[in-house]
Image: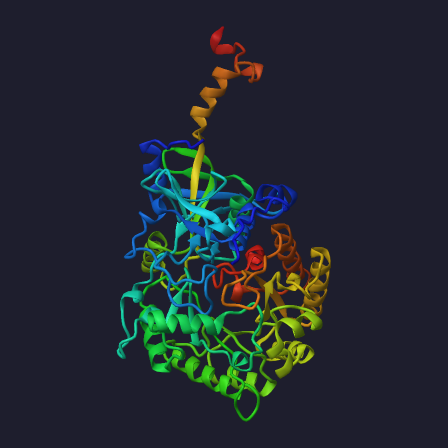
Amino acid sequence: MAAQLTQEQIALFNDPETHKVLATLDESGAPHVVFKQSLYVSEEGNIHYLELLESSRSNHNLVRAIWFDRKVSIVVKGGDRQSFQVKGQPVEVHISGTLFQKHYVEIQERLGDVDLAGVWVIEPQEVINENFWIRKADEEAKHPLFRHLDRIAKTEKHQ
Amino acid sequence: MSVAVKRTFEQELSLNDVAAKYPDVPRLVIIKTDVQRRGIHYTESALSIVDPTVHQMRSPYLFGSRDGEIKDLPESLLLRDGTTILVDPTPLELNPYLVDLVDGKLALVDNDEVVEFVKLWPKPQYYDIKTSSGIPMSHIASARPQRLNIFQSSYCHFWAEHKECRFCDIVNHTKQQKNELGVPVRLKPYDVSETIREALKEKGRFTSICLTAGSVLKGAELFDNEVDFYIETLQAIGENFTTKKFPSELISSAFNEKQLARLYEQTGITSYTSDLEVLGEEKFNWICPGKAESVGYKEWKQRLVRAVDIFGRGNVGTGLVGGVELAKPYGFESEDDALRSTLDEAESLAEKGVTTFFIVWVPRPGSDFRDQQNPSLDYFIRLSTGLHQLRVKYGLSIDYNDYRRCGNHPDTDLSRLL
């Protein structure tokens, strides 16, 4: 089931200053985690990932994901402690056609003599806010017992 | 008068059965294989969204299609993993997959069920242009999603002696294309060079060039004239590159060392394929009588092995028409026997650095094997995994003939992760 990113999340995702990390699984199930700035949200709400290297581990793992229905994760972190994670499913890779060629030209304008292996389309399936203070409030609401007693013990200032 | 009976495939494992039996084989590759095996038929509603200004329509090709006709239909299909399906329009009585319009998108449909959504190949920009000699450039170079095919000459001299390969329809199809479309039988190097130059203007469109033709037996030594034609054309293509070598594949007759050295040294070619078509001397002699008589099975294999010294490991291969080893009446009677024999022979080549790949055999009306049936999907999947595993075992790369630079081999699709 596809999940939708909010306009605020999309803006953060597409901000070139934002740090983005892509996590995929290799053949043995081990995570492969790398910074990838060539990730962005497309107009239709899917995540597009520009893979520049055909033989990269990420690309191989994405092929495995589309072949064997594996998920990937993307973590996005901007300023002001904003951070969220998207779990998604690779659903298509463009290796030719209008979208591919548009990105091929753009990436060369940006980086010079580089190639483009594919434009991966990742359908978001779950969006998790990773801002610590929001996650903390959420846990305290759902799991009020998950805390050390000293945090609620009376101290001198309560005497 | 013969009556066509709809092929039902009831005695064979279905697509879903095969996918369940081989969970380590991607379902998309299994779908591709079965679509190639059974062919396709476009419904009227599917054709209603085809736009010839955007989609690549069928262009001249070396071989004919399963319906034996030249129609203005889409060239072929792409799957969502980037896999190309090269597949023929096929008469409905042969029970092909339908390409239908479902929820506004094209889908492969079988027994009223959507099997997978597909896309059409994008049309390259040079298809709208003619050479300065007035030939449509689509008649000079036919495109795949990421590859350019140059069919330098579509006449094969084995046909002149009635010793053509029994699955092949090259000359019958050539005559049909010449008569119906005016496609030149032999290309001029300057037309090829001009077409390549135009094609390269489209950024991001092509990653490799494949050159092939029918066998030419003439020359001081067997095939010398064929080698000369290729050198001339490859040098013309090379005029368009800044580097001497460019990603490319030559699919040709089995040349001797002297001929191969000339090709490698005098042109930009980077990889060499010479198709044995079927493995095993007995089957080769029956199915490929011209090749058997002119070079012979053992010598053909030796020439492939010697090519590795020139082109390097991973850059030399041989293609099979997968399934003809089971053709009647002299083919294997059991798929198990056919598979064992084929993989044993392929291993004897892999040990020496030659990789083997296959295309799915499609019995074409212009060939001697026109009335036969190709093997089961199960067989083709076992052949795919077997050939892929040989590449894994012997560390053989297939970069030059993979899903992107070719797209016509289910087994090299599997090798995408090597």
In the depicted structure, whether residue A85 falls above or below residue B196:
above
Image position of B166 (left or right of B341): left
Residue A61 point in image, percent of width and height: 54, 48
Q: Nearer the viewer, residue B295 or B242?
A: B295
Q: Quadrant of the C terminus of chain B?
A: bottom right
- Residue drawn at (56%, 57%) of the image: B410
Q: Nearer the viewer, residue B284 or A145?
A: B284
- Residue drawn at (64%, 60%) of the image: B387
In the depicted structure, whether residue A43 falls above or below residue A158:
below
Residue B48 point in image, percent of width and height: 31, 47
Q: Nearer the viewer, residue B139 or B4?
A: B4
- Residue drawn at (57%, 14%) of the image: A149
The image quadrant of residue B412 is: bottom right
Image position of B3 (left or right of A133): right
Image position of B316 (left or right of A100): right
In the depicted structure, whether residue B288 falls above or below residue B113:
below
Residue B72 in view: yes
Residue B275 point in image, percent of width and height: 58, 72
Q: Residue furthest bottom?
A: B220
The image quadrant of residue B140 is: bottom left
Residue A124 point in image, percent of width and height: 43, 36
